[in-house]
Image (cartoon, rainbow, N blue to C red):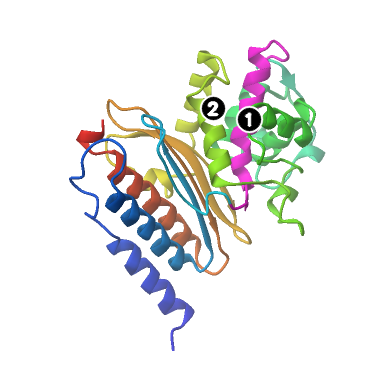
């Protein structure tokens, strides 16, 4: 009989072994069929380890090539929505509709669970929009996220902004912490890996923001402190990475971001792990393995 502890050990052992070399030495350009199939097999193997659903979208911005698993299925965004909220603040700043220097004051009644930065500024001068964005992007501060949402009219306004980016799928409906709980419809506060990866690209390397705002958003992603065991743990040495995590043990674990190989355009990655039957350690390692896969696929010298 396989116990939960022995299953956990088997999963970690399988993650440590992985699948290597199936795409090594392949020619440059679009992934050969054999390499793509091997990568898809690897994603299927990783999904079996979580006893749930694994949603993945990897986009090579150099070629536009996309690789995914369950890329058009809905997943709870969790805290990955904070990247979109920060992007909207920057877009409003670019258009002169708001200022990053605007100071927002709040009370202890505004605090929700996990407020490592905002909790230190109750009753003083408050925080600027730039400071709130930095807090929610680098520490996933939930109160900062709620204050940001209120600054531009709430979740509905964020969804309208997302629609304006050409994303007809991703939606924001509630505030923290309620937005983490799946709704009976399976729709509220959800996205698909494909949709959010394309939106991520428009905000970070596309034309949705001014060059200065793109750089600021990238800097917030690079400065994130919550994702050391996820995408960051799997990328090859020498790559630069920025990402935004999402976590709720009763739902799963997510990480979205972009990584820059040396002398090569960015790789966009979104990973959504919907599982409550394995440990947080396993979820983290599966996300890291997806980044490792992206590194093997697109980090080869001939693909630069």
User: Residue 110 appears at what percent x and percent y?
Assistant: 79, 38
Horizontal relation, residue 195 to residue 20: left or right:
right
Which residue is at a point 50% across and 60% down the rendered structure image? 280
Identity of the residue drawn at 58% across and 40% down: 195
Q: Is residue 90 magenta?
A: yes
For marks 2 and 1, give the CA distance. 9 Å
Image location of residue 209, percent across then percent down: 57, 19
Mark carried by residue 202? 2
Q: Is residue 269 above or below residue 274?
A: above
Q: Is residue 171 above or below residue 185?
A: above
Circle 1 residue: 166
SS class, disc 1: loop
**Front-most of residues 208 and 129:** 208
Where is residue 134 drawn, in percent x and y? 58, 28
Looking at marks 2 and 1 on the same chain, the residue that comes earlier in the sequence is marked by 1
**The N terminus appears in which quarter of the rendering?**
bottom left
Closer to the eye: label 2 or 1? 1
Categorize mark 2 by other alpha carbons within 10 Å: few (<14), some (14-19), many (20+).
some
The residue that appears at 50% across and 45% down in the rendered structure is 255
Quick one: quadrant of the C terminus? top left
**Near-viewer residue (58 or 32):** 32
Q: Look at the numbered discs 2 and 1 and tell me whether their residues touch, using CB distance below 8 Å.
A: yes
Residue 19, quarter of the rendered image: bottom left
Most common SS among magenta residues: helix
State the extent of the magenta-drawn residues as a range. 73-99
Residue furthest to the top? 96
- Residue 80 is one of the magenta-drawn residues: yes
**Residue at x 29%, y 50% (from the top left corner):** 35
Q: Does residue 212 appear left or right of residue 67 in this picture? A: right
Whether residue 225 is visible to the viewer of this picture, yes or no, is no
Residue 80 in percent (x, y) is at 59, 42
Which residue reaches farthest bottom?
1
């Amino acid at each position: 009989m396989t116990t939960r502890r022995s299953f956990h050990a088997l999963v970690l052992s399988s993650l440590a072994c992985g699948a290597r070399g199936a795409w090594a030495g392949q020619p440059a350009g679009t992934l050969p069929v054999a390499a793509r199939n091997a990568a898809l097999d690897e994603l299927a193997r990783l999904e079996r380890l979580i006893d749930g659903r694994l949603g993945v979208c990897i986009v090579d911005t150099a070629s536009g090539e996309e690789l995914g698993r369950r890329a058009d299925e809905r997943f709870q965004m969790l805290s990955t929505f904070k990247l979109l909220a920060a992007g909207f603040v920057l877009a409003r700043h670019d258009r002169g509709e708001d200022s990053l220097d605007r100071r927002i004051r709040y009370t202890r009644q505004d605090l929700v669970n996990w407020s490592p930065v905002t909790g230190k500024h109750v009753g003083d001068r408050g925080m600027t929009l730039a400071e709130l964005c930095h807090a929610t992007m680098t520490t996933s501060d939930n109160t900062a996220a709620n204050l940001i949402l209120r600054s531009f009219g709430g979740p509905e306004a964020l969804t309208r902004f997302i629609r304006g980016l050409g994303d007809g799928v991703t939606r924001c409906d509630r505030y923290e912490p309620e937005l983490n709980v799946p709704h009976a419809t399976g729709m509220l506060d959800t996205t698909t890996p494909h949709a959010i990866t394309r939106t991520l690209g428009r905000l970070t390397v596309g034309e949705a923001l001014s060059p200065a705002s793109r750089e600021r958003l990238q800097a917030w992603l690079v400065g994130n402190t919550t994702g050391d065991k996820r995408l960051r743990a799997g990328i090859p040495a020498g790559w630069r990475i920025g990402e935004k995590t999402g976590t709720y043990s009763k739902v799963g674990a997510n990480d979205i971001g972009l990584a820059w190989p040396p002398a090569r355009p960015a790789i966009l990655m979104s990973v959504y792990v919907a599982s409550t039957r394995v440990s947080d350690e396993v979820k983290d390692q599966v996300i890291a393995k997806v980044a490792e896969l992206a590194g093997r696929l697109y980090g080869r010298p001939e693909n630069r």
